[in-house]
Image (tube, rainbow, N blue to C red):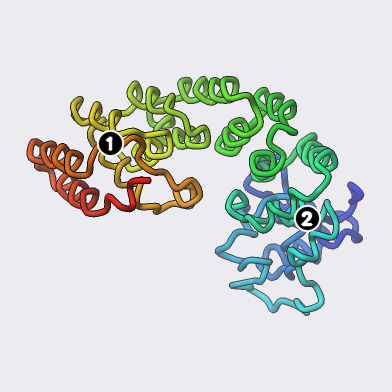
Amino acid sequence: MPLNQCEVCHHAPLECRIDSDEPEQPYLLCEQCAHRLLTFSLRPLEWFRLAARHGPSQFYLHDDFYFFHGVAQVPREEVLFPELFPAPTLEEAAEDLETLIDYAMTQHHLAFEEKTLALLRKQNTSALLASLRERNAHPHAVEIEAQAYEICANVLEREAEAWIRSRWDVFRPGAFFSLAAASAACLPFQEGFHRVIHELNAMKQKEARHFCSVLAHFRTEKTLDWLEMHVSTPVTDTWGRLAAVSQLSWARVTKWLEQGRPLSLVALDALYACGHYDTPLLRKLTPKLLEPDTRERMTERLEWYAADDPAPRVQQKVAAITSQWDAILL
């Protein structure tokens, strides 16, 4: 698209600059398209073009205003002839690499959109990586940066090693989750894990608690060692879910139970998460408890702990765990 043309219609000259959530990435539009943007009355193809460039979660574009595929939910003016401006379907997008990448950029949860990822895996990897590099070589929305990392993590893997390594010098914090996922898939394990751990260790405690789930992508017992040094109160489910996907064994659970709070609470949350997949990542990774003891001895150990810690949270979690060993074990 020429630089002096509207980002939506691709033929009218630029007339309006409308601020987005990112100061360096405003919407650059002609007057008519700007009006439709501000009145939440974009046609599906117009929404698609902007979402592919700015990300589908930007203000004026997100799902409070548009259904999937850019159908206006709450237009302030009539949407004019939407049937003449359909957004491409996945099958239509797959006919052209750049359109398929655009389609991927409009997905809210790309890492879990297996049909889209499967079609991307069929593309020429060199051309795919070149397009991702180009889209991030000039001012771009952070959501587009994150989507590029998700494609590297789920499609390109080691083919994107050099590019992902270079991105650690320039990434923006809003893309950290996705860069960590890409580092787990694209870089040698020690390098990727070290880079993510270094970043987490530089954060304040509250930030580290929020971002620590990025370690789930490495699925390593080394994460449990990191948790032992960094778990703090309040103990949220995040710690336990992370432990569950990090090669959790019964030996580690008993160690944490013996150490008491806060690690004992993390141990219970982790056991529960091994049989209760309540997040997309847990459903994707399906963790199970490794190297278990007999069900009878594990139940006895948990009930012994519950007798020593009468908090309702503990009582409820132990009861739930001991009633679902079939789901928790391999």
Task: Identify the secondary structure beneath mark 2.
Answer: helix
Give the x, y percent position of residue 138: 79, 36
Mark 2 nearby-residue class (10 Å; few <14, some 14–19, many ≥20): many
Mark 1 / mark 2, whichever is N-terminal: 2
In front here: 220 or 31?
A: 220
Where, by quadrant of the figure, is residue 167 drawn?
A: top right
Residue shown at the point (63%, 55%) measured from the top left: 114
Tell me where residue 265 appears, x and y as whole percent: 24, 37
Residue at which label 1 appears: 267
Element carrying mark 1:
helix
Question: For residue 100, which numbered disc appears in the image?
Answer: 2
Q: Amino acid at mark 1?
A: Ala
63 above or below 328?
below
Q: Residues within 10 Å of mark 1 (few under 14, many from 20)?
A: many
> Quadrant location of residue 78?
bottom right
Q: Is residue 286 left or right of residue 106?
A: left
Residue at the image point whose x is 74% and y is 50% from the top: 120
Is 293 positioned to the left or the right of 5 in the image? Answer: left
Residue 26 as seen in the image, left or right of residue 328: right
**Front-most of residues 100 and 285:** 285
Residue 241 circle label: none
Total numbered badges shown on the rendered structure: 2
In the image, residue 313 lies at what x, y percent? 18, 46
Give the residue at the far front of this rendering.
294
Please give the name of the residue rendered at 73% of the width and 57% of the height, measured from the top-left corner. 103
How far apart are labels 1 and 2 at the CA level? 42 Å
235, above or below 81, in the image: above
Q: Is residue 59 above or below residue 138?
A: below
Asked if labels 2 and 1 touch by Cβ distance under 8 angstroms, the answer is no
Q: Percent position (x, y) of residue 300?
A: 13, 40
Residue 28 vs residue 175, the one in the foreground: 175
